[in-house]
Image: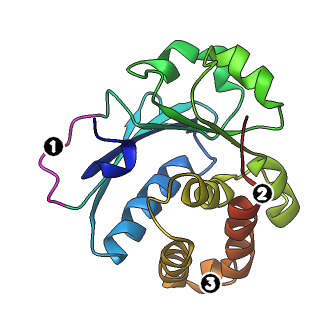
Amino acid sequence: MATATDKAMREIRWHGRGGQGTVTAAKMLASAAIIRGKHGQAMPEFGLERSGTPVKVSTRISEHIINTRAPVEHPEIVIITDPSLMFTIKDIIKAGTDENTVFIVNTNFPPDKVRKILDIPNNELWIVDASKIALEEFGRNIPNTAVLGAVAKATGIVDLDALKQEIEEAFSASSKLRALIPQNLKALERGYNEVYKAD
């Protein structure tokens, strides 16, 4: 049986809230994969497009051309960028997952509590307090860059240098964004270094 790392295409689903950069993070992950010669796509699914409302995004990364644009229904990896969603849309978060699904969660909760809330006693679980990193680096709860670092560490889908390159290129579009590059690079590195795999 093929393992997750043997698959030619990796399917990821993100769950966050509007205004926290979840869609941007998903797109940057796909773009970083493209930098490394792979194929990538990121497709948001919006309900009401306003700050604070739940946002779901599908990302696919593949060695081959991606011929579908359907939402990811059976994710190999689920990323939760806002921990409050575990309480409000748990069924949506867990839809299509199984015991092999990897969960990456932005939270300061201990692993046992996360496992109990999501009812994932045996799944691979990674935790990063990306909100704390964001507040310390930006003064705002925009955890997307720190989460990206955590995803790189937890999955190996893309390497940290590719994400750094993507941040530098994406943020070079304007002087205002360019000024934020150092903070974002630091948040990225902290997410990579501070995420941990739960026992």
Of badges 2 and 3, the one in the foreground is: 2
Q: Is residue 176 left or right of residue 3?
A: right
Secondary structure of the residue carrying tag 3 is helix
Sort mark 1 into few (<14), some (14-19) or many (20+) by Cα contacts within 10 Å: few
Q: Position of residue 81 (x, y in %)?
A: 63, 41
Magenta-drawn stretch contains 66: yes
Q: Is residue 77 above or below residue 26?
A: above
Looking at the rendered structure, the kind of residue marked 2 is: Glu
- Residue nearest the viewer, comparing 123 with 169: 123
Residue bearing mark 1: 68
Residue pointed to by mark 3: 178
Most frequent secondary structure within the magenta stretch: loop
- Between 52 and 24, the residue placed more toward the observer is 24
Q: Secondary structure at mark 2?
A: helix
Q: What residue type is disc 3 on?
A: Arg
The answer to the question of whether label 1 and label 3 lie on touching residues, with beta carbons closer than 8 A, is no
Residue at x 29%, y 59% (from the top left corner): 40
Question: Label 1 sits on what residue type?
Answer: Thr
Q: CA distance from mark 2 to mark 3?
A: 25 Å
Q: Are marks 2 and 3 in contact (CB under 8 Å)?
A: no
Q: Position of residue 186 (x, y in %)?
A: 74, 73
Whole-percent x and y of residue 91?
51, 13
Q: Closer to the N terminus: mark 2 or mark 3?
A: 3
- Dot 2 and dot 1 residues touching (CB under 8 Å): no
Task: Tell me if residue 122 comes above or below residue 7 in the rendering.
Answer: above
Q: Give the labeled residue for mark 2.
A: 194
Q: Which residue shows up at 52% across the image and 56% down it?
A: 25
Question: Is the N terminus in the top left, top right, bottom left or bottom right quadrant?
Answer: top left
> In the rendered structure, which segment of residues is drawn in magenta?
64-71
Q: Earlier in the sequence, mark 2 or mark 1?
A: 1
Pick the residue in front: 176 or 190. 190
Q: Is residue 106 above or below residue 123?
A: below
